[in-house]
Amino acid sequence: EAEIWSCWPQCYLGKDLEGMPVLYMRLANLNVTEMMKDIQVTIDDLIMFHIKQQEFMRELTQEASRQTGKPVGQYVFILDASRSSLSTHLSTNAREFFSRLVSTDSRNYPNTLSKIIIINTSSFFPVIWSFVKNLVDSKTRKRIEIF
């Protein structure tokens, strides 16, 4: 798991003004094909890692509920798209991974995201988005803000 962390770092930034936890990830660091080759992980391993992250975020929302005295069942996800590349994020392995990740989240973690904020997008980001947006249900798509 430590090897996955080194290739797929994410960090908890704190809470937003409504008390929701905020998670940050830099997309450029997530190179599925390279991770599979270099640290010998499978897509199943990456999905299990993601599930652990989702459970951690669930714990943070429960803690936020206790601290604020009101229900906090969602979190904010900031995705930094700086230095992302088409070859990395549209590879066969990446497409399979993203497809399975979205499916896992839709089945097991519906409505846990308050919003997804995608920042530092490049001129080719619309190409990546054209693939990814078809994987995401319409309710979730409405919660995505792209800058």
Image (cartoon, grey):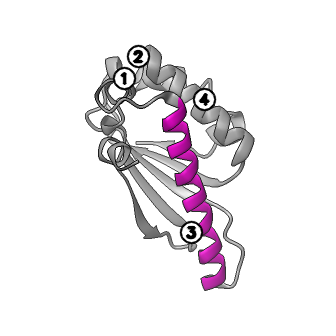
Kindly identify the residue that appears in the image at 33 percent across and 44 percent down: 3
Asked if residue 32 lies in the magenta stretch, the reply is no
**Alpha carbon separation for disc pair 4 and 1:** 15 Å
Work out which residue is located at the far top of the displayed protein and give it. 92
Mark 1 lies on residue: 33
Earlier sequence position, callout 3 versus callout 1: 1
- Asked if the residue under mark 1 is in contact with the one under mark 2, i.e. CB atoms within 8 Å, the reply is yes
Residue 105 picture quarter: top right
Residue 60 visible, this orientation = yes
Kindly identify the residue that appears in the image at 50 percent across and 36 percent down: 45
119 with respect to 49 (left or right): left
53 with respect to 70 (left or right): left
Kindly identify the amino acid type of the residue bearing the numbered disc 3. Leu
Kindly identify the amino acid type of the residue bearing the numbered disc 1. Thr
Residue 112 locus on image (x, y percent): 66, 54
43 with respect to 63 (left or right): left
Kindly identify the amino acid type of the residue bearing the numbered disc 4. Arg
Mark 2 lies on residue: 91
Which tag is nearer the camera, tag 3 or tag 1? 1
Residue 100: numbered disc: 4
Q: Secondary structure at mark 3?
A: helix
**Alpha carbon separation for disc pair 2 and 3:** 33 Å
Q: Secondary structure at mark 4?
A: helix
Say if 93 sits above or below 20 in the image: above
Earlier sequence position, callout 2 versus callout 1: 1
Q: Which residues are magenta?
A: 44-67
Residue 60 locus on image (x, y percent): 56, 69
**Alpha carbon separation for disc pair 3 and 4:** 24 Å
Mark 3 lies on residue: 60
Q: Nearer the viewer, residue 10 or 77?
A: 10
